[in-house]
Amino acid sequence: MKNLYLFLAITFCFPVFSQKSIDTIHSEKLNEDRVFSFSLPPSYHKNKDQKYPLLLLLDGDYLFDPFSGALSYGNYWDDLPEVIIVGIHQGKEREYDSDVEAESGLPIEKGAKFFEFIGSELLPAIEKKYRVAPFRIIAGHDVTAGYLNLFLYKDNPIFDAYISLSPELGIDMETRIPSRLALAKKPLFYYQSTADGDLKKTQKRIKDLDANIKTLMNPNLYYQLDEFKNASHYSLVTFSIPNALYHLFGAYQPISTAEFQEKIVKLPSDYVGYLTKKYDLIEKSFGIKMPIRVTDFKAIEAAILKNNAYAEFEQLATLSKKSYPKSMLFQYHMGMFYEKTGDTKKASKAYMNAYMLDEIGDLTKDFMLEKADEMKTK
């Protein structure tokens, strides 16, 4: 219950990404108009060159607001990126939109047309109108959660991440889905959830699918199952959404205390390489190109100091100059390099050079003067 209260606070106490808007698209495939909700990130109109991941919600009628609230909260703390959210309104049409043939498990009739509508009409229209990064997420609940797996059956799946909340799985999906996930040649994220309030038959099939996925050895697959206790088929959605988003965007998050202690500080060397690879992964996985966070520079600085790997300060300086060319960070790292390798004269000069540049993080002009004076007494 405590988690539910937290989720409600996230949803209602933090401003959503931007005001939700309603739009309509005419579908030639469906021969009808379809309504969808969408929101753009707050920075969308400020950062003219920035592209954003796309989150497509089936059952957008009721999934839009909880997803938007969780994303807004996570972005407030810089744990989750800004994304473009599109939620398809389905209402009573959701069963027809998700229609599949019982024998083959493939979409038929309106289910087949809806499948084509998403891939050949809605997505191209959204990506033509808005700056979408090459990272697409699809999410759904029960019948639509089962349906979204059909996009994995394509030779080149059009989605990079799948959020399947208490799915009603189609025929043989327990084996078909793992066989498709095994073929991933690039990062692919898959999340599913169930609860003890789900039907026993539903739980069993989800757990069978989970067991089969866990046998896969594909390093490109990032998978998680959550099983919630004391939750219903509907309340599990409120628990699942934050977990799913933090699973998908785990690599995006700033370096945490746990990551520092369990992964970074234990490395024998190449701490700067770890930082470079982290941001390369963010760009490769999510299509997000962003400057390295100052807090992450500080984490690598701490690892270098703890392991006496002082030569790496020179590499860190090169990276900080590229990320923040007008700030004092580059000269500060060069000062640390010279100081720790015994050249106090060059260290003092570097700290004085830093004094002339822009302050950043907890690095101030007074601090640089103190460091420069300190070098003169050594």
Image (cartoon, grey):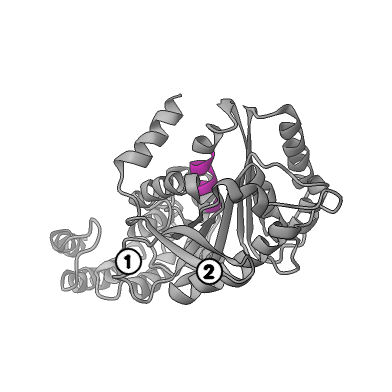
Please state the horizontal and vertical placement of residue 370, each as a whole percent of the image.
15, 59
Depth check, mark 1 against mark 2: the one in front is: 2
Question: Farthest residue toward the right?
Answer: 103
Mark 1 vs 2, N-terminal side: 2
Q: Which residues are magenta?
A: 240-248
Dominant SS of magenta comes to helix
- Say if residue 99 shows up in the picture: yes
Q: Which numbered circle lies on residue 247?
A: none
Which residue: 49% across, 70% down? 126
> Which one is in front, 116 or 168?
116
Determine if the magenta segment contains residue 85. no
Identity, as a three-letter code, of the amino acid under mark 2: His
Instruction: From this view, report whether residue 65 is shown above or below residue 180.
Output: above
Q: Is residue 26 above or below residue 374?
A: below
Amino acid type of the residue tagged 1 in the rendering:
His
* 69 over 126 or under it: above or below: above
- Toward the viewer: 254 or 59? 59
Q: Nearer the viewer, residue 134 or 294?
A: 134
Judging from the image, what secondary structure is the residue with disc 1 in? Answer: helix
Name the residue carrying label 1: 333
Residue 279 in view (yes/no): no
**Percent position of residue 85, x then y:** 45, 58
Other-residue count near label 2 (Cα within 10 Å), few / some / many at <14 / 14–19 / ≥20: some
The residue to which callout 2 is attached is: 26
Q: Is residue 354 above or below residue 91?
A: below
